[in-house]
Amino acid sequence: MAAPPLGRLVLTHLLVALFGMGSWAAINGIWVELPVVVKELPEGWSLPSYLSVLVAVGNLGLLVVALWRRLAPGKSERGPIQVVQALGVVGTALLAPLWHHVSPVAGQLHSVAFLTLALVLALACCASNVTFLPFLSHLPPPFLRSFFLGQGLSALLPCVLALVQGVGHLECLPSPTNGTLWLPHDFPERFPASTFFWVLTALLVTSAAAFQGLLLLLPSPPSASTAGPGSGLRARGPGVEEEEEEASPLQESLSRATGATPSPEPEARRLLSVHGACLLGLLAITNALTNGVLPAVQSFSCLPYGRLAYHLAVVLGSAANPLACFLAMGVLCRSLAGLGGLSVLGMLFGAYLMALAVLSPCPPLVGTSAGVVLVT
């Protein structure tokens, strides 16, 4: 078979990366924008806790997709993907003009528009996990790398945009009429939150356009009812070279390393082993900390040190995830001792941040550079 044109191959990888960029860009964008909107919305420091709950409720999107597959078996993933992308684009586009609108609920003002749209975006982002990857299963395995690279960009690009935006601050300057009188001046961000959400909408529109480009570039994937086991990986777009499925180093079997004959149910036995239970436990603890506990209390642990400290903690924390994934592509740690050591180190940092949240608004080292560096 003739080699595919280089330009077509590069274009396909680029479209797949842009397609993956839209998976979690909306929720990641809201997270890094919290330091800007938290001072305007009535929930105040409790806003990250509200958002953590909404993201957890967003996992109901997985049930919706499962129900759709039950009621419409054998259908293509094209429809659900387009629905997910439409929800993301419309939700972020509505956030731009409506994020600061508040409404009374039970006698108290709440940012109903912001929280409702955040829930819609959480449903869309959670549903993207189980709709995007099945579509990509019809492409050669190397394109998965481009997709995961795009998913990393879904966190990295909003972080870069938030760093460019900056965060407002108060500064006392001498009065122009009386040099002995110092007056507070509020210096806003380089651009408002509405502009941030409009740029985020443009990123999601680009991702949706990339998906439409993939539909034009590649043939229609076989339906689930006609595709046999593994047939999805053999489906190829025009001009895309057919390649053998790559073996992942994370899936290397124990029998290959020891030369032993594999057992009839190696995967089930591996998960039921002590080693597998330890790995699942570490996964549960780290996910609970990074996706639930720490984001919910981050405002209480960081805001006493100032808006800049909170802004940097949110942005750099979000950027650390894709950077760590890129690092893991070249440096793999598979030993239980190594993974356990990294998890313990992370839990120590998490315990320190939770202690700061408990002691808020008067945690230690407030007003010092050392406190800002530690919390960031």
Image: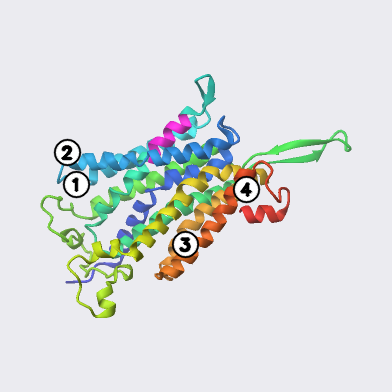
| Residue 112 spot, x, y in % from top left | 47, 28
Q: Is residue 47 left or right of residue 243?
A: right
Q: Which residues are magenta?
A: 113-122
Lower sequence index among marks 4 and 2: 2
The tally of labels here is: 4
| Residue 366 spot, x, y in % from top left | 71, 48
Q: Is residue 190 visible?
A: no
Instruction: Kindly identify which numbered label has been placed on residue 356.
Output: 4
Q: Mark 4 and 1 residues: CB-CB less than 8 Å, in contact?
A: no
Q: Is residue 311 left or right of residue 20?
A: right
What is the secondary structure assignment of the residue under circle 1?
A: loop
The residue identified by callout 3 is 324
Magenta stretch: dominant SS? helix
What is the secondary structure assignment of the residue under circle 4?
A: helix
**What is the distance, in whole Å, between disc 1 and disc 3 at their CAs?**
33 Å
- Amino acid carrying mark 4 in the image: Leu
